Amino acid sequence: MERPDLAGEPRGAHGAGAPAQRPRILALLPDVAWPLDGGKRLRQSGNLRGLAAVGDVDLAVLFSTAPDDVPPVPPDVRVREWRRISPDPYRQVHAAVNLARGLPVRIGAQRWDRIRGELADWSAREYDLVWFGGMDLAHGLRGAFRARRTVVDYDDIETAAWQAYLDAGAGDRLERLQRRIELPLWGRIQTQVAAATDAVVVCSHLDVDRLGAGHVAVIPNTYPEPAARPRRDRSAAETGPRVVVVANWETDANADSARFAATDVLPALRRLLPGVRLRLVGRNADRLADLGGLPGVDLVGPVDDVGEELAGADVALVPTRYGGGTRLKAIEAFAYEVPVVSTALGCEGLGVRDDVQVLVRDEPEAIAEAVRRVVEDEPLRTRLVAAGTEHYRRHYRPQAAVEAVTAVVDHVLVAGGRGDRAAR
């Protein structure tokens, strides 16, 4: 498949044809870029950091559940203005009516009219670029802003995520019915949004192939390099190995992975390693309250420093069964030099290979055996850690996102586009 090269050497700040002034950019993001306590927020941080490096940015954060008392911008990133807008959604009956009209619930339930109203003064401004942090934002706010060019971040390819959900047999009958109905609707919106924008960005080359269309670029999910890797700290009374799963448990895909690990993988693992502990770390752990009483499960919840939790881990487990994007859980473990055992879906798109950077297994018994191998085979553990850390340093440090964003902005503003128009 032939694609335009959107990831070449940046020219926007220095090359021929570069604008005399820094471009004015409107960034519409689906979550805050600070604090860095979740995969979506880490991606927003990488994108915003790249945009602020090449232009003057107005930032609107939409639908975030982050605390209002924390600025949504990293302390070392400068933007012109920022706003947070999270109107209450419509009631379920309204979303159901919109679903019947061809809109997925996540789009049909949102109060786009209120967002447009709160950003009405910005809609009168002229931007060189509007950056939409999701296809739902691009669809819901189409035509709301004036811009020379637009870019849409397909962080998750919704059709792939929905299909993986159905293939995994997740959810109850009603949820699965809704997903089956929404799958072609997302496909239609995915195509429409791509046709109306100057470039689409995704998080892996695998997602480029899934879209199968032009003007697609890769901006990798990245993770900040730890300033220091905490020393391994274990209680003297603790004799068994630790297996850690880190996630924001708010999302259905992550909650499903925790239940799969606790109810399917852990019983098989306890037969091999009777003293093993499965530690579930991350925000919104109240969704997993019923797992806290299971034998061998530690429902840790949110922590101030995930590095300290990973420092005590023998294995980082990524038991993902459905969802989209690339899993920062594996990248995070690589950064902290922790060996990884993952499902195939949990590490797809990262460019890793089984038995090189990770051990890839999908069935509970096979996952348990892989964990046992890592715990008991020190040469294997050392080899996985070295390869995973090298892979992280070469491909997934924050500068990789900055360089990719710079290349995309340069391409759409300097190398070509579809002409001045309202952003949609």
Image (spheres, rainbow, N blue to C red):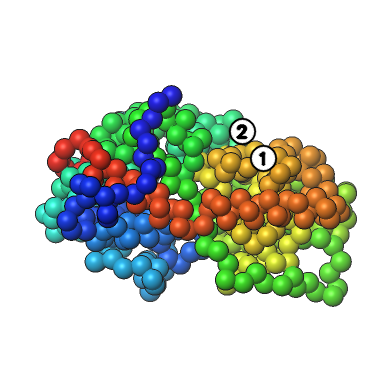
Side (left or right) of 133 relative to 342: left
Residue displayed at 14% across by 52% down: 126
Q: How crowded is mark 1: few (under 14 residues within 10 Å), some or many (20 or more)?
A: few
Element under label 2? loop
Q: How far apart are marks 1 and 2 (CA)?
A: 26 Å
Residue 69 appearing in the image: yes
Residue under label 1: 353
Q: 80 above or below 21?
A: below
Q: What quarter of the picture does the N terminus occupy?
A: top left
Q: Which of 210 and 29 is in front in this view?
A: 210
Q: What residue type is labelled 2?
A: Gly
Element under label 1? loop
User: Which residue reaches farthest top?
Assistant: 1
Q: Position of residue 51 (x, y in %)?
A: 32, 56
Q: Position of residue 337 (x, y in %)?
A: 68, 60
Residue displayed at 40% across by 68% down: 74
Residue under label 2: 169
Q: Position of residue 359 (x, y in %)?
A: 73, 44
Q: Quadrant of residue 118?
A: bottom left
Q: How crowded is mark 2: few (under 14 residues within 10 Å), some or many (20 or more)?
A: few
Q: Which mark is residue 278?
A: none
Residue displayed at 84% across by 75% down: 236
User: Which residue reaches farthest left?
Assistant: 124
Q: Which amino acid does label 1 sit on?
A: Arg
Q: What quarter of the picture does the C terminus occupy?
A: top left
User: Which residue reaches farthest front?
Assistant: 16
Q: 5 above or below 257?
A: above
* Sequence-first tag of 1 and 2: 2
